[in-house]
């Protein structure tokens, strides 16, 4: 058994209460590591073709990686996956906090949940023991109350809890799995999948530790990070986390405004991290084994619940301020912060929630919807009270909230073809808060992401406009050096950056490690070598990320997706007439070339995007997949 693993994957069937432990071999861990690659493998192996996402046959997979349980800085993350209720494609969403580390200390490398409980239940996993408890008394309660109740019921304040809120119970298609009350595995609707299984929560507590082959070698990587993160990580400077980027992107024209329809949000200062901190800041928070304290905790006293901010739910990040804020034309930062709090309280993805509301506001502005269609509600840009009310309605599937809960792509199909230009999704998932006209190869990343539009498993063009550690990281594995390159360019050099860094990002979601830390490929290769006792090179690291992409691609192709689904919404390709990006467009022929070039780099068929046999052989996947094919 290699270091960093127990060689044990727990399978638990909620329908029967039965469980069994699978013991994969060393090659399984060497090739996949964990996280997204592990999720895609089990979906291919154990999920029948074309299963409806809310069927008991769907799998819910909690997948840490080899880094969890080792205290490597940035390893306070894990992945949650299954077939997405939002997209029908692979669902793979990551969360920070403490749950992944604590789960790894229970003595398992992953948890795969099968079936559906007859009534609401929760699982307790403690040192290789799994017990199913009734959860009827927890159903319908806010996430903070549920975590407190489980800890009190089991007499352990150190339990870590992954759970769904009201939105997951009601199968809102973009419901999140909430960890530690304010960390969300937000995208792809994994909370809805969990709710369909009547699984309210998974509480974990462990005292075990996976073996580490060379602690002294591992300490070298950790020490380097400790000495350099303050100068190399952008998020270590201000102390306001990702919120601080809102003003920068707003100034550059990169802050999505009114459902991606306007070039700039002129009132962006109203939503800035500086303003939020001045009004609501209480303290800062971090994830397990991370020195970058980038999480914020907000508080605001008020006589009524609608204007009160509870610090237990933390505070919004950039994505929430953009999706619930500028995308909906909001200037009321308290309303945006409250809407984000409700997303954590009820278990909602803040990105899809904000974009769903923005889509309806856009339909209202164009006259495609009226108050007669929405139960009397006027969905107008900038209405903070409506924003908060809409989030409540979505979580409860109450009134028009039942339609909002289906997501933008389904709403557009329901409302008619005239709304299709307002449908800002890829593969059925709403775009995050990064403007592809500003970060153009990131637009290619939206197109080819197996989970639908995704900003984390992606590449930020603006990081390579200078000779920083990101560009140095790419050049470390290239035979020739790429010079700093414009974010408004897609060419061969940019695609070389895209190919290598996209594999890197997918590797980080297999490991599982925070994307904000300034590691090089060599750092992670050394860390994995130290943990496992197997020597990894930088190219081996990138191959892990590539396997995650290939396995995810194979799953999506099996479920009916094709190369035609790798496309951007037309609206985000067209040039604005004013603003910093005036005249900047994403040309279809450029995107077509970039997609084909990406397929070629991945050893996929350049037309269909099907991974070739050469690709599978190169990545050692043929042997792993022999029983599946």
Image (cartoon, rainbow, N blue to C red):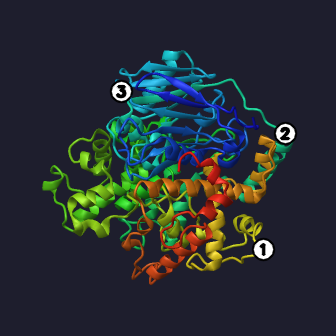
348 and 545: which one is in front? 545
The answer to the question of whether label 2 and label 1 lie on touching residues, with beta carbons closer than 8 A, is no
In what element is the residue under mark 2?
A: loop
Mark 1 element type: loop
Mark with earlier residue (2, 1): 2
Pinpoint residue 60: horizontal percent, then vertical percent: 47, 38
Task: Specify few, some or many for label 2: CA neighbours under 10 Å numbering under 14, 14-19, or 20 or more.
Answer: some
Q: Earlier in the sequence, mark 3 or mark 2?
A: 3
Give the class, few, some or many, for how many residues have Cα within 10 Å of label 1's Cα (few <14, many ≥20). few
* Circle 3/circle 1 CB separation < 8 Å: no
> Mark 3 highlights which residue?
139
In the visual, does 74 lie left or right of 111?
Answer: right
The image quadrant of residue 532 is: top right
In the image, taking residue 68 as reference, residue 333 lies left or right, namely left
Residue that mark 1 sits on: 479
Please name the residue that numbered disc 2 is placed on: 214
Measure how far apart labels 2 and 1 are at the Cα level: 31 Å
The label nearer to you, 3 versus 1, is 1
Of the numbered discs 3 and 1, the one sitting upstream in the chain is 3
Q: Which residue appears at 45% of the width and 21% of the height?
A: 17
Q: Position of residue 107 (x, y in %)?
A: 66, 27
Q: Check the image and report above or below for 466 versus 448.
A: below
- SS assignment at label 3: loop
Residue 598's disc is: none
Q: Give the quarter of the figure containing the N terminus.
A: top right
- Residue 68, quarter of the rendered image: top right
């Amino acid at each position: 058994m290699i270091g960093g693993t127990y060689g044990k994957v727990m399978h638990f069937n909620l329908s029967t209460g039965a469980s069994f432990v699978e013991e994969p071999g060393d090659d399984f861990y060497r090739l996949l590591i964990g996280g997204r690659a592990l999720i895609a493998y089990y979906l291919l192996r154990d999920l029948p073709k074309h299963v409806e996402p809310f069927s008991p046959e769907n799998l819910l997979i909690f997948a840490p990686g080899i880094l969890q349980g080792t205290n490597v800085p940035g390893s306070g993350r894990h992945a949650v996956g299954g077939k997405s209720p939002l997209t029908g494609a692979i669902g793979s969403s990551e969360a920070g906090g403490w749950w992944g580390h604590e789960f790894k200390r229970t003595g398992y490398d992953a948890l795969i949940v099968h079936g559906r409980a007859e009534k609401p239940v929760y699982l307790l996993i403690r040192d290789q023991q799994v017990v199913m408890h009734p959860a009827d008394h927890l159903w319908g309660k806010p996430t903070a109350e549920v975590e407190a109740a489980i800890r009190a019921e089991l007499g352990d304040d150190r339990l870590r809890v992954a759970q769904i809120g009201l939105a997951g119970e009601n199968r809102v298609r973009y419901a999140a799995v909430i960890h530690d009350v304010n960390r969300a595995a937000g995208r792809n609707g994994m909370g809805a999948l969990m709710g369909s299984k009547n699984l309210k929560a998974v509480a974990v507590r462990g005292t075990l530790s996976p073996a580490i082959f060379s602690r002294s070698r591992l300490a070298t990587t950790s020490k380097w990070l400790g000495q350099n993160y303050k100068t190399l990580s952008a998020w270590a400077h201000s102390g306001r986390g990702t919120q601080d980027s809102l003003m920068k992107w707003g100034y550059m024209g990169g802050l999505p405004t009114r459902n991606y329809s306007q070039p700039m949000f002129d009132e962006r200062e109203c939503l800035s991290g500086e303003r939020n901190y001045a009004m609501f800041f209480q303290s800062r928070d971090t994830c397990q084994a991370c020195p970058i304290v980038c999480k914020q905790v907000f508080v605001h006293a008020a006589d009524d619940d609608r204007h009160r901010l509870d610090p237990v739910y933390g505070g919004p990040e950039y994505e929430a301020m953009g999706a619930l804020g500028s995308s909906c034309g909001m200037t009321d930062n308290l309303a945006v912060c409250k809407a984000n709090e409700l997303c954590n309280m009820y278990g909602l993805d803040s990105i899809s929630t904000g974009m769903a509301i923005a889509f309806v506001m856009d339909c209202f502005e164009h006259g495609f919807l009226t108050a007669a269609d929405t139960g009397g509600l006027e969905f107008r840009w900038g209405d903070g009270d409506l924003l908060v009310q809409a989030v409540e309605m979505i979580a409860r599937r109450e009134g028009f909230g039942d339609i909002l809960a289906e997501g933008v792509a389904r709403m557009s199909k329901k409302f008619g073809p005239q709304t299709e230009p307002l449908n800002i999704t890829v593969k059925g998932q709403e775009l995050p808060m990064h403007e592809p006209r500003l970060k153009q190869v990131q637009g290619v990343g939206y197109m080819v992401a197996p989970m639908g539009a995704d900003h984390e498993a992606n590449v930020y063009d603006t990081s390579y406009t200078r000779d920083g550690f990101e560009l140095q990281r790419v050049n470390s594995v290239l035979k020739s050096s790429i010079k700093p390159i414009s974010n408004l360019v897609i060419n061969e050099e940019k695609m070389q950056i895209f190919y290598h860094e996209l594999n890197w990002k997918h590797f980080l979601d297999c490991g599982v490690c925070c994307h904000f830390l300034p590691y090089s490929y060599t750092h992670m290769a050394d860390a994995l070598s130290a943990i496992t006792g197997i020597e990894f090179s930088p190219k081996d690291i990138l191959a892990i990320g590539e396997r995650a992409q290939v396995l995810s691609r194979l799953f999506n192709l099996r479920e009916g997706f094709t190369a035609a689904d790798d496309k951007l919404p037309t609206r985000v390709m067209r040039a604005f007439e004013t603003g910093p990006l005036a005249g900047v467009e994403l040309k279809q022929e450029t995107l077509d070339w970039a997609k084909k070039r990406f397929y070629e780099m991945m050893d996929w068929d350049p037309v269909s995007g099907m991974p070739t046999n050469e690709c599978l052989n190169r990545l050692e996947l043929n042997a792993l997949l022999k029983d599946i094919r």
